[in-house]
Each structure stands twice: as structure tokens, then as C-alpha cells.
Image (cartoon, rainbow, N blue to C red):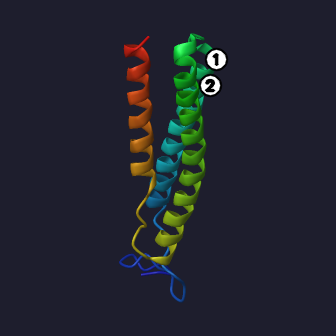
């Protein structure tokens, strides 16, 4: 059958090769997390720059901006680390690791949405 066994995807004497489709899917997932991170950073900067300067909303706006910026930075680092862990698991033939990014981003965006709603309601 040649140098590459089509059933196992391995080269004789070596570890199994990673299917490039899975590697590219892992990369696309990473890039999606990075786009979300950039959007959170941009949203935080926009809130910090353009939020009303009314004294009653200044603290809430600053908290919202900070939350978005911190969440965006944490997401970027977490996406990189998760992508590396997934790639390592694929190469080694281990089960894929779970991600803490999903609950983290869900909680952070929910908190930001609630804070936005409060800012709008009590404007």
C-alpha cells in the first residue's frame, strides 16, 4: 500500500500523522476566539471613549470598559493556550481537552450585557 498506511494514517515506525483537516479546524477555532477577543477590546475602548460623562454613570461605564478589555485580553491568551493543548492532544492521539473559555466568555459577556442594560435603564 505504500509508505503510508491509509487505514491508520501513520507512517511505519512513527506516530500517527495529524489529519490536516483537524489541524485547520483547530486553527479556525483559534481565529474565531481571537476575533471575539478583538471585538471585546474594541468594545471596551469604545465604551471608555464615548460613554457619557454623567457622574452617575461614570463608574459603571468604567467598570464595563474594564470588563470588556480584561475579558478580551484573557480570551486572547486562553485561546492561544487552548489551541496548543488541542494540537498536542491531536498529535499524541489523546482525547481533546475541555475548554474553560466557553463558560468564562459566557459569564463575562452576560455580566457586560447586564451592566449595559443597567446603564441604559438608569440613564
21 and 73: which one is in front?
A: 73
Image quarter (top left, top right, bottom left or bottom right) of the N terminus: bottom left
Q: Residues within 10 Å of mark 2 (few under 14, many from 20)?
A: some
Q: Is residue 71 above or below residue 84?
A: above
| Residue 33 in view in this figure | yes
Q: Position of residue 92 (x, y in %)?
A: 50, 77
Q: Dot 1: what SS?
A: helix
Q: Is residue 29 above or below residue 116?
A: below
> Residue beneath label 1, please?
49
**Label of residue 22 in the image:** none
Residue placed furthest toward the front: 56
Tally of numbered discs: 2
Q: Dot 2: what SS?
A: helix
84 and 51: which one is in front?
A: 51
Q: Position of residue 59 (x, y in %)?
A: 56, 24
> Residue beneath label 2, please?
45
36 and 108: which one is in front?
A: 108
Q: Position of residue 49 (x, y in %)?
A: 64, 17
The residue positioned 53% from the left and 66% from the top of the image is 85
Q: Position of residue 76 (x, y in %)?
A: 58, 46
Q: Is residue 92 above or below residue 19?
A: below
- Tell me which corner region of the image, top left, top right, bottom left or bottom right, holds residue 45: top right
Q: Is residue 11 above or below residue 20?
A: below
76 and 27: which one is in front?
A: 76
Image quarter (top left, top right, bottom left or bottom right) of the C terminus: top left
Distance between the alpha carbons at the discs numbered 2 and 1? 6 Å
| Residue 51 in view in this figure | no
The residue positioned 39% from the left and 79% from the top of the image is 8
The residue positioned 35% from the left and 78% from the top of the image is 7
Does the CB distance between marks 2 and 1 fall below 8 Å?
yes
Q: Residues within 10 Å of mark 1 (few under 14, many from 20)?
A: few
The residue positioned 52% from the left and 49% from the top of the image is 30
Amino acid at each position: 500500500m505504500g509508505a503510508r498506511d491509509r487505514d491508520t494514517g501513520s507512517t511505519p515506525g512513527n506516530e500517527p500523522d495529524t489529519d490536516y483537516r483537524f489541524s485547520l479546524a483547530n486553527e479556525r477555532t483559534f481565529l474565531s476566539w481571537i476575533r471575539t477577543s478583538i471585538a471585546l477590546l474594541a468594545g471596551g475602548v469604545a465604551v471608555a471613549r464615548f460613554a457619557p460623562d454623567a457622574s452617575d454613570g461614570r463608574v459603571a461605564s468604567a467598570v464595563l470598559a474594564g470588563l470588556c478589555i480584561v475579558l478580551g485580553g484573557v480570551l486572547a491568551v486562553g485561546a492561544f493556550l487552548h489551541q496548543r493543548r488541542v494540537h498536542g492532544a491531536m498529535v499524541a492521539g489523546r482525547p481533546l481537552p475541555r475548554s474553560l473559555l466557553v463558560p468564562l466568555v459566557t459569564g463575562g459577556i452576560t455580566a457586560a450585557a447586564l451592566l449595559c442594560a443597567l446603564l441604559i435603564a438608569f440613564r
